[in-house]
């Protein structure tokens, strides 16, 4: 079955440093979604990427979808304490409601 | 405010007991899902439903059961057959179930006494 690998599992940064998390799928994806889960909270949708090579920005967050539509990344510039949480990618194989496979997430820990 | 409501927030299960987790949505979404979250494991799909009175097993359905008698409601029963039920359970919904974005409830933490 489809597998989505996400690295790193944990990332400690000083406030103000940049942060990147990477996702790799074993199969070609129809789209990829990113979610953020704050400590003690629930996942909240951030963005969906659909096109090969697509790049989208949300303020300090930059999302990329690879040319082969099998990998993606999320980059945060100049982290702030509000960025703390776990970032999940979710790859959609296009198979319908059960086609979304989540990565294990990257826990972002920020030291002031 | 539209959204997904899960209850209870915390639940304790005794050995041999079935427990039911509630999930209600007022987003008028067709599709609803149940995910299990364990530390370091990400989210794993238990069951999903795209239409009333119909549901399908996800990757880890053993020991769980669901019903979808109303569009708004998708309760999950953790049966005594689930030997390792301690986890954070998340209910989600989406517009049609075609792989679009998910809206999550606030979750239920289930623990075994």
Image (spheres, rainbow, N blue to C red):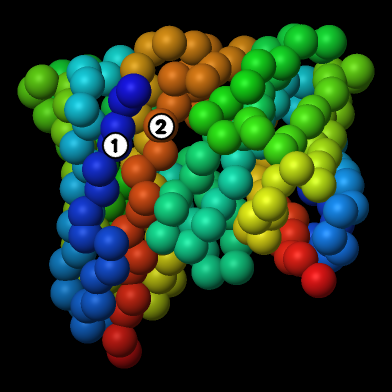
Secondary structure under tag 1 reads strand
Residue A65 image point, x, y percent: 19, 31
Residue A39 image point, x, y percent: 53, 69
* Residue at numbered disc 1: A4
| Parent chain of label 2 | A
Residue B27 image point, x, y percent: 75, 28
* Residue at numbered disc 2: A101
- Of B110 and B107, the residue lying toward us: B110
Q: Quadrant of residue B58?
A: top right
Q: CA distance from mark 1 to mark 2?
A: 7 Å
Residue furthest out toward the bottom: A112
Secondary structure under tag 2 reads strand
The answer to which of marks 1 and 2 sits earlier in the sequence is 1
For the point 63% across and 22% down, the residue is B57
For the point 32% across and 79% down, the residue is A110
Q: Quadrant of residue A18?
A: bottom left
């Amino acid at each position: 079955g489809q597998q989505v690998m996400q690295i790193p599992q944990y990332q400690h940064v000083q406030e103000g440093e940049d942060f990147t998390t990477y996702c790799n799928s074993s199969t070609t994806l129809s789209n990829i979604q990113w979610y953020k889960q704050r400590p003690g909270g629930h996942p909240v949708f951030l963005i969906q990427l659909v096109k090969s090579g697509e790049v989208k920005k949300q303020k300090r967050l930059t999302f990329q979808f690879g040319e082969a539509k099998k990998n993606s990344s999320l980059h945060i510039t100049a982290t702030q304490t509000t960025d703390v949480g776990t970032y999940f990618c979710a790859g959609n194989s296009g198979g319908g409601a059960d086609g979304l496979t989540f990565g294990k997430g990257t826990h972002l820990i920020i030291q002031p | 405010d539209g959204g997904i409501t899960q209850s209870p927030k915390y639940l304790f299960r005794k050995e041999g007991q079935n427990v039911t987790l509630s999930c209600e949505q007022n987003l008028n979404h067709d599709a609803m899902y149940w995910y299990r979250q364990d530390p370091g494991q990400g989210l794993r799909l238990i069951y999903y439903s795209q239409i009333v009175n119909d549901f399908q097993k996800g990757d880890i359905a053993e020991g769980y059961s669901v019903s979808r008698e109303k569009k708004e409601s998708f309760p999950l029963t953790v049966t005594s057959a689930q030997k390792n039920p301690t986890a954070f359970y998340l209910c989600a919904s989406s517009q049609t179930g075609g792989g679009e974005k998910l809206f999550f409830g606030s979750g239920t933490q289930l623990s075994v006494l």
